[in-house]
Amino acid sequence: MENLRSKPFWDRSPLESLADGYKKLPRNFKLCMLATFIIGLAAHMYCYTNMLTGADDAFLFSDTRTFADGASGTRWLLAIYFALIKTIRMPWLLGVMTLLLYGVAAWLVCETLSITSSVGIILVSGLMVTSPTMISSNFYLTSAHMYAGALLFACLAAYAYKKWRHSWIAAFVFMLLSEGSYAAYISMTLCLFFLCSLKELLFDQEANDKHNLVRHFGMLFLFGGSMVATTVICNLITANNTAGRVQDAQAQAATDYIDNIITSVQQVFAFFLPGTSNSYFHGERVMYSLFLLCAALSAVLVIWLLVKQQLWKRPLGLFLLVADIVCLPLAMNVIGIVSKWVHTLMTFAYLTPWLFFVMAVEQLYRRDDLRKDWERLLRWGYSLLSCVVAGLTVLCGIRLANICYTKAYARYTEGLADSIRLTNLIEAIPNYVKGETPVAFVGVSDNDFPWQDAYELTSDIAGIGDLYYWQGMYTAPFVLDSYVNQHLRANMLIFPQDAAIFTADTIADQLNDAGINASADEIKELLQDLHAFPKEDCWTWYNDVLLIKLFAN
């Protein structure tokens, strides 16, 4: 067979060019992509074939988003990402694109941490693609590729900073792109940097502590500079009309930042320590118990390597080791500095302990100075436990993903039936005119309607929680408006608008702002004679406004 490389590109067929390109791909990259797609499809196929979109993004297939819309909340690249879904309208294809980006990000993580064994690559790919954050991002399927892009740029920034010449320029650009996609994923850049530093301090026998210190200051300035630059870009694009995270960050005083730093660290410890959280992580008792054992053994490993490396003879190296360990919890939740409220979609860097486990196994087997039997036994035991913990975590992630999607689909169908029932009831009311009659929903519930307490392991996954499913439309006006008007095309003039709760006071204020005379006390008095939905007598007229009582409160 003729050697393809001996032929100029214009003499090759497209298939020959593809075959030649595939051969040039690194083996580790191909293995990473294969593991990502096999494990990713096992975890997320149900979501990609059932289109489980939430209220936040259900309308994005049809509505447009400008650069200013995205920049108002730090995502100044939003318009580019959503330009893609105008072309790629098939949910499963969006899923394939998301997995592709995750696969490249996993390969970058492996290259950055020098993980080259087949088992290590498969474990890292599996951990990343089955993380709760990945599951959460799929509940915003029209945005999932944006979150994956943010992760890819964050990992690329860490990779460039470690591998490339003049790396600070490329790292700064990639950090800007990551923050412009979704700022929370910048935590991965910081965590990968700290893991690289720990690898050099604990495993590299010829480490240069002064060079390492300079790189620490470089990363500090890169991170701070990218955050400032992101704020400047958002203000320029929006003409200083920012909102959300950008506005919150600008409004905070120095004391607010200190409080947020403390809260961010507390959130990390609450996730990992026993008895502090009731998440899926603590609910998987076998996995969690083995994780704690592996974490304890990792602490022993760090102390042993500290002695082995004789770090006490290198004060700067010892200082950097302590600084890295102390700073890692904050780096894992750095977005909390500008926002105390952090949910699953923003915590991808919580994978850091597992990445350390896999990285440590790789580095231990590269040392040729472990000659004593107890040292080899410790290495073997730690390696076995780390692989078991990582593998079990991947299996639990696959299980968690399918439970989440099954639960979401059940709530979707149930909530859709209730939405149709509510819309049909309103449209059958005499004198109601579609698109013209104001409809005011009033009532506050202590729990979601209708409520079913099931699948407790998924309660902390953003996208499956309080507001972001069909039943949640009864507790948040913007959710109700998205589904009733976007999905059912009911063209209903809903009040309240741009509010967080259905209260009589909110209704009265917004009706008055719309030029309709309204009193909160009169509304409350009218509601006393009504029964809450789904009863037929849940409605009444008030100054040409249709009042609907959603809840008894």
Image (spheres, grey):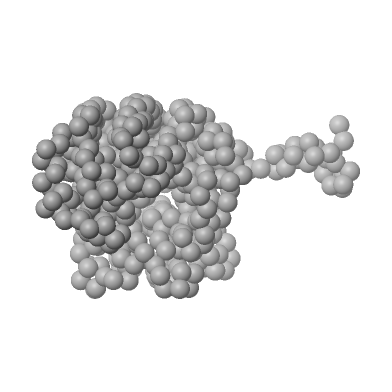
Name the spot of residue 399 as percent of width and height, x first.
36, 27
| Residue 207, visible in the rendered structure | no
In which quadrant of the rendered view does residue 200 lie? bottom left
Q: Is residue 40 above or below residue 174?
A: above
Picture residue at 32% right of the left edge, 39% below the top: 431
| Residue 14, visible in the rendered structure | yes
Picture residue at 11% right of the left edge, 38% below the top: 529
Picture residue at 27% right of the left edge, 44% below the top: 546
Name the spot of residue 386 as percent of width and height, x first.
35, 36
Q: Quadrant of the C terminus?
A: top left
Position of 87 compared to 403: left or right? Answer: right
Q: Is residue 236 above or below residue 499?
A: below
Q: Residue furthest front?
A: 431
Q: Camera-side residue: 234 or 127?
A: 234
Picture residue at 51% right of the left edge, 49% below the top: 63
Name the spot of residue 487 as percent of width and height, x first.
43, 38
In which quadrant of the rendered view does residue 132 lie? top left
Q: Is residue 116 above or below residue 169?
A: above
Q: Camera-side residue: 405 or 158?
A: 405
Position of 338 compared to 18: left or right? Answer: left
- Total count of labels: 0
Q: Camera-side residue: 141 or 267?
A: 141
Name the spot of residue 447 as percent of width and height, x first.
18, 37
Q: Quadrant of the N terminus?
A: top right
Q: Camera-side residue: 447 or 100?
A: 447
